[in-house]
Image: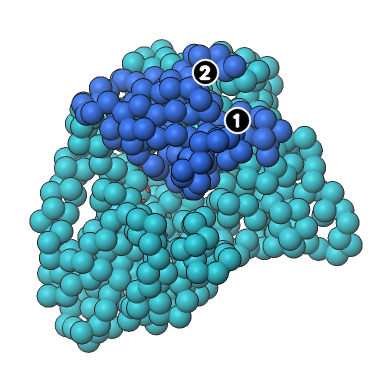
Chain colours: A blue, B cyan
Amino acid sequence: MDAPKPQFRRVAARAGQPAMLSFDGTTIRATTGDSVLAALLESGALIRRLEFGAEPRAGFCLMGACQDCWVWSAEGGRFRACTTEVADGMVLSAEPQLLGGADG
Amino acid sequence: MADIVIVGAGPAGISAAETLCAKGLKPVLIDEGARAGGQGYRRPADNLALDMNRLMGSEAGKYAALHRRFEALRAKIDYRPRTLVWAIDGNQLHLLQDGRAATLAFDRLLIASGAMDRVAPLPGWTLPGVFTLGGAQVALKDQGCLIGSRVAFLGSSPLLALAAKQYRDMGADIAVIADTTPFAAKAAALPALLRAPRTLLRGISYMGASLRAGTQMLHGVTPVAVEGEVRVEALLLRDAQGRERRFACDAVALGYGLKPETQLADLAQAEFAYDPDFRLHLPKIDGLGRARPGLYLAGDGVRIGGADAAEASGALAAHAILTDLGQPQDIELVRRLARQVERLRAFQRGLARAFAWPAAQIAALPDSVMLCRCENVTIGDVRMAMAKELGPIEVNRVKAMTRCGMGRCQGRVCGPALQEIVAAGRDGASAGRLRGQAPVKPIALAAAGDPA
Ligand SMILES: Cc1cc2nc3c(=O)[nH]c(=O)nc-3n(C[C@H](O)[C@H](O)[C@H](O)COP(=O)(O)OP(=O)(O)OC[C@H]3O[C@@H](n4cnc5c(N)ncnc54)[C@H](O)[C@@H]3O)c2cc1C
Ligand code: FES
């Protein structure tokens, strides 16, 4: 388990509807308008990818250029977490196979 | 009527669209982002309680003006947000909008694609908590978040002090501002910087603010490593006196200035030339921004010049288009814009010396350092490939042998450092130029029609 200490620290409140997502089985609370990456990093999650020897990553450029922040959704696609907004009910994982039976 | 397409809705693209619109033309303005404004004048999300006046400081007025101008323009142009241009062939753009692929033909193309951070690797830079300097600003402006609670700023750029000030104002602890360029080199570059005194003063005021706030600011450092088990715990440096210094922190913002995003210009068949001041291969343009007939380049996507230069060069390129369409021009206005662009870009050239890309430090990095984050290629892997070749070797050959620069970022992150490893202390031009490839950013394969 990752230490739950969040990487990002929120300093400006966001007004909006709450959105709940699941990432590698953990529930994450976010607000509509948050990027998926910000929601993950604010909650203490990291992106652990087997292709990098399970080395943790957390994105790098935060502007859609480095592609270091890919995550997989239960619907099957992968996307950049830094440029994708959260949506209530998203089911995500760092690795496609970790989604297990949650095929959509 | 000619179909004019502008890629990039930053200050350069917006002012180009405005200039064309004023002459009765209706350009298409495409941007990957959901909100216009580009990077420097990035607009925060509407629902974020962020005081942009405070964050933008002396630039707040210009920031607000650009967004006002865009709102006035919006209905008069064919604006297409959330649309990525991922390939160009002939006079056709390949687009991806909300997951759907489309093509768009153009008669004249203006690319104003902006810039991204140039970064140098160091041991530990793939640890969670290391972000680009620009990314640190994006986190704040887009998400209302700091990249950490105690942040070290490392690299060589006047933006280190600017971002540190923004971070401190928002409540972060600043562990250190560490610049790899020696102080003496900055003093030596001063004459070139006096060409844009306003910008220079702004830079000095950020540094002054850091000093007043008691932040440690070091010049001439050698980065040693980012340390941490699972995430960043400290930044280790050697200072100008050669002493090892450890700064506890939970995040590092890394930035060695900006480099133009030239992939689209490459696909649009612009010619490139090596620029020794920036140590980068840059597209060739004439005084108005023409790269070849029908292709125009403006803003930080072709020469780093900052937001003001981007705006002026966007308008200038629009005048070039109008001239090429046979429209009469206000020569005096065009000359004034050209002079302004020239002056601001010369200032950036001075900055590139005052805040130098640390080519020698990179060439001296140990083999174990990760160079390509996408394909997990180390510097040692690259050196081994070079040793296998008997004659001179250039970056595209190294890429084919090691996959460094072939990954999903297309060499955006590792490219400049790869150049220095391959040049191994020689002139950067000797390493050759990493060629751009479609898709410029990864896209879902279904959208490409065939395997990309
Ligand atoms: C992260 C970051 C932060 C910065 N912060 C500051 C700052 O605080 N102050 C400052 O003075 N300068 C800052 N700059 C410098 C910045 O480059 C200039 O201020 C200014 O934004 C340059 O304007 P531009 O119009 O040339 O490019 P940008 O403003 O960068 O606009 C380029 C636009 O092109 C779009 N684009 C690029 N490629 C494609 C494509 N393939 N398909 C579709 N759209 C595309 C991008 O989405 C972007 O909106 C920053 C730069 C970066 C990268
Ligand atoms: S963090 Fe670089 S693309 Fe998302």
Mark 2 and mark 1: span between their CA atoms? 18 Å
Q: Residue at x 88, y 56 (%)?
A: B388
Looking at numbered disc 2 in the image, what kind of residue is underneath it?
A: Asp
Q: Quadrant of the N terminus of chain B?
A: bottom left
Residue B67 percent across, percent down from the top left:
18, 48
Q: Chain of mark 1?
A: A
Residue A10 percent across, percent down from the top left:
34, 21
Residue B77 placement, left or right of B34: left
Q: Which quadrant of the structure image shows residue B333?
A: bottom left
Looking at numbered disc 1 in the image, what kind of residue is underneath it?
A: Arg
Q: The residue tagged with tag 1: helix, strand or loop?
A: strand
Label 1 within 8 A of ligand 2 by Cβ: no
Foreground: A39 or A28?
A28
Viewer-nearest of labels 2 and 1?
Answer: 1
Q: Residue at x 84, y 49 (%)?
A: B384
- Are discs 2 and 1 less than 8 Å apart at CB? no
Residue B242 percent across, percent down from the top left:
69, 21
* Residue closest to the far bottom: B326
Foreground: A42 or B243?
A42
Residue B163 placement, left or right of A2: left
Q: Is residue B373 shown above or below B427?
A: above
* Residue B341 visible: no
Q: Residue at x 34, y 16 (%)?
A: B171
Question: Residue B31 — which label?
Answer: none
Q: Is residue B136 shown above or below A83?
A: above
Q: Are marks 2 and 1 on the same chain?
A: no
Identify the residue under disc 1: A48
Foreground: A9 or A73?
A73
Residue B323 placement, left or right of B24: right
Identify the residue under disc 2: B250
* Residue A71 visible: yes
Q: Chain of mark 2?
A: B
